[in-house]
Image (spheres, helix red, strand yellow):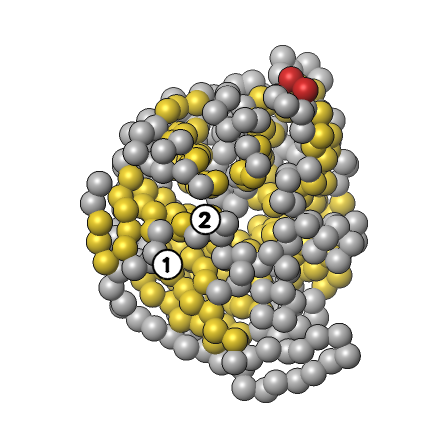
């Protein structure tokens, strides 16, 4: 393994100078800085970086679509440890829980790479492209904001009509599909194509976004193993009754009571009743409905739901430190694709197709 020190290419402070008060919540002044992670080489094979912050264990991960690229930092981005998960290719997702790490891909051979020793050794898990009946390029575990791990439980939506779930981590996941003719587990209402998911601490309640504008609530009664686990999915609700655009940002508080979501265009939405109803955050930044290029791509929030970060493709990152009442942004325009926020709201990672950045957040 190799180690390196992150060098600062740029530091951009942003501040909201007007502090106001409401009867419910203080509007906090926020500033943040962005630093490029130089250990993530620019213009890698096919690019497409994504990240994950294991907040409980304070470990940050960055992976690239190039099959040989994966790094982690255990000291707030000061040094990065290079991992070599050669068991998978076309990596597009990463999640971890302490020394357990799972990488997801749309590789033609193996969709999951697992390590249980912090990235020293890896095993492969084949989910495959079948039994998909449409979209032959679809696969499990490739939604960059999708995979979830907690309490020895794993969940992933798919961009190929299904869910994958496992308990414990080291067993081969079981596949749940809406198709009643499938040889796998039949679960009605599973969305055909999902980009993201989020869940509460024990993953008993999971929110899944679809490419037709719906948010589904998945309920899992976890057993001692997969055979004793019961999973169900509701019919889903349109985030905006007038739009079937894809849900491209989804994140929730640790108890699952607060949920944030956004479509490709429009404003940011918030639920304070565990995803039953959503309202528009009127002060949030907005993408015009006719803008199909500079769209929202990813969203992440803190464990208490007070801090939110959302990124826009070919545009900027936006942060709120007061539950969506006020927002700040920077001047760094990039092809932002994914964001991952530490659960305490102090730091984040934001990735583009060719670069990865580490961010610090300050509250004035």
Going 63% across and 23% down the picture, which residue do you hit? 224
The percent coordinates of residue 256 (x first, y second) are 69, 49
The percent coordinates of residue 223 (x first, y second) are 67, 25
Secondary structure found at label 1: loop
Disc marking residue 16: none
Going 48% across and 43% down the picture, which residue do you hit? 144
Going 69% across and 67% down the picture, which residue do you hit? 281
To which residue does mark 2 refer? 57
- Do the numbered discs 2 and 1 sit on residues whose CB atoms are within 8 Å? no
Tell me the distance, in whole angstroms, between the alpha carbons under discs 2 and 1: 11 Å
Q: Is residue 89 visible?
A: no
Q: Is residue 181 visible?
A: yes
Count of numbered tags: 2
Foreground of the two, 343 or 16: 343
To which residue does mark 1 refer? 76
**Which mark is in front, 2 or 1?**
2
The percent coordinates of residue 285 (x first, y second) are 60, 69
Classify the position of the N terminus by image quarter. Answer: top left
Outermost residue toward the bottom? 18
Secondary structure found at label 2: loop
- Answer with left or right where residue 248 lies relative to residue 89: right
The percent coordinates of residue 73 (x first, y second) are 34, 51
């Amino acid at each position: 393994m190799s180690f390196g020190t992150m060098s600062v290419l740029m530091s951009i402070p942003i501040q909201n100078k007007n502090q106001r008060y409401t009867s419910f919540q203080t509007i906090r002044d926020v500033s943040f800085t962005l630093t490029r992670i130089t250990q993530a080489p620019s213009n890698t094979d096919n690019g497409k970086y994504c990240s994950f912050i294991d907040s409980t264990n304070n470990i940050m991960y960055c992976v690239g679509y190039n099959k040989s690229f994966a790094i982690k930092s255990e000291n707030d981005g000061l040094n990065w440890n290079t991992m070599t998960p050669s068991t998978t290719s076309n990596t597009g997702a990463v999640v971890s829980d302490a020394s357990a790490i799972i990488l997801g891909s749309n590789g033609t051979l193996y969709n999951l790479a697992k390590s249980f020793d912090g990235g020293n050794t890896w095993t492969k898990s084949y989910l495959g492209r079948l039994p998909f009946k449409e979209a032959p390029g679809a696969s499990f575990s490739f939604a960059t904001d999708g995979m979830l791990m907690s309490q020895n439980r794993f969940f992933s939506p798919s961009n190929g009509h299904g869910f994958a779930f496992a308990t414990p981590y080291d067993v081969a996941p079981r596949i749940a599909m809406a198709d009643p003719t499938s040889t796998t587990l039949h679960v009605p209402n599973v969305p055909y194509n999902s980009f993201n998911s989020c869940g509460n601490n024990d993953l008993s309640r999971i929110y899944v976004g679809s490419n037709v504008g719906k948010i589904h609530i998945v309920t899992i009664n976890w057993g001692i193993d997969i055979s004793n686990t019961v999973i169900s999915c509701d019919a889903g609700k349109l985030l905006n009754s007038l739009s079937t655009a894809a849900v491209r940002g989804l994140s929730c508080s640790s108890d699952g009571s607060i949920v944030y979501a956004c479509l490709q265009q429009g404003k940011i939405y918030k639920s304070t009743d565990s995803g039953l109803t959503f309202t528009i955050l009127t002060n949030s930044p907005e993408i015009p409905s006719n803008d199909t290029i500079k769209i929202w791509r990813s969203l992440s929030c803190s464990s208490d739901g007070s801090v939110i970060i959302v990124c826009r493709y070919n545009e900027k990152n936006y942060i709120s430190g007061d539950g969506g009442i006020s927002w700040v942004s920077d001047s760094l325009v990039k092809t932002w694709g994914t964001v991952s926020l530490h659960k305490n709201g102090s730091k984040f990672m934001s990735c583009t197709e060719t670069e990865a950045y580490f961010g610090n957040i300050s509250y004035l």
